[in-house]
Amino acid sequence: MNNRQKKRIKDAARLVNSVTEMLDDMEDMSKQYDADLKSFISKIDKKDKKSSQSTHNPTSSESFNLMTLEDFEKKPEDTDGSESDEPSSAPSGRRAPPKKKGRPPQSAIKGLYRQVMRKCHPDRSSHEKLTPKQSMQYTWAVDEVTKAYQKNDVKMMIFIAAMVEEYSKVLSAKDCLKNLNELYGEKSEQLNSIQTSVAWLWGINWDTLEIRCQIIQAVANSYGIIVPPKVDLLEMLVKHETESL
């Protein structure tokens, strides 16, 4: 593998790193938005508990950061858990077997693991001359490559190795780039899922009461919670936004 190919791999790894950092931040934010939305739904449920027909606790472990508005707008018969006329693809109570995928060469996985460990593990190399940033990156690489090795996750191993400028001696540059591009695509899809979730829409539209009303209406309806008149709902939203966390 020549220097030009290594640079392409490192550049692709940096893109994966960038989208991964963004994904981590957005996941944290989405969890906060999720908790805030549940908090407001709970206020509506308590406001008129006697007339509420709530059939499910909206503050349960179910996450709105994994659901879209379309999920809440499905007809009841689509979400009541009743049996479908379509035949099940797997026996009841069992998960369908995963699709078989071509496994990467074991030598490639072991090789990348050893290369990263040899370079980054404090017991195998001197870290005295490393900058604080390099030291943190090496510690990160050791932790992450261990997890990836246990999962036989060659995509992550290629990514982690490239971030500390180590490259596979078994896989071709083309294969490495293919895996990194696939990993980038997977991370990007996760970003898109967050950005289209109910929790995210709730959080970013803190100053758009009309959209928040639509979200509340959709979510409350799905739980059988009676929404107060719009005037009262708007007043609750304004009060909720001005409250201290």
Image (cartoon, rainbow, N blue to C red):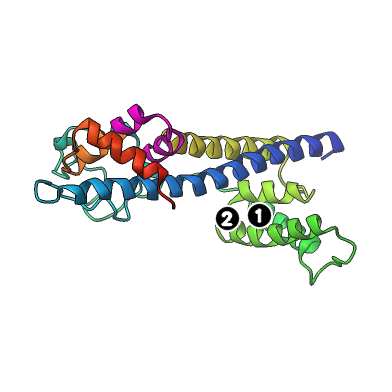
Residue 187 in the image, given as x and y percentages of width and height:
55, 40
Q: Nearer the viewer, residue 223 or 104?
A: 223
Residue ID at (81%, 59%): 132
Tell me residue 43's x, y (percent). 26, 49
Foreground residue, 189 or 114? 189
Which residue sits at x=77%, y=51%?
164
Image vertical order of residue 167 relative to residue 70, above or below: below
Where is residue 143 shown, x and y percent of the image?
65, 62
Q: Residue 181 appears in which quarter of the rendering?
A: top right
Is the Cβ of the residue at disc 2 closer than 8 Å to that at disc 1? yes
Residue 149, by quadrant, is: bottom right
Q: Residues within 10 Å of mark 2 (few under 14, many from 20)?
A: some
Query: What is the magenta range?
Result: 197-214
Report the disc number at residue 152: 2
Residue that protrudes farthest toward the right in the picture: 129
Q: Which residue is mark 1?
A: 109
Kind of residue at disc 2? Asn
57, above or below 128, in the image: above
Indicate left or right for 225 with 209 as reference.
left
The answer to whether residue 72 of the structure is visible from this angle is no
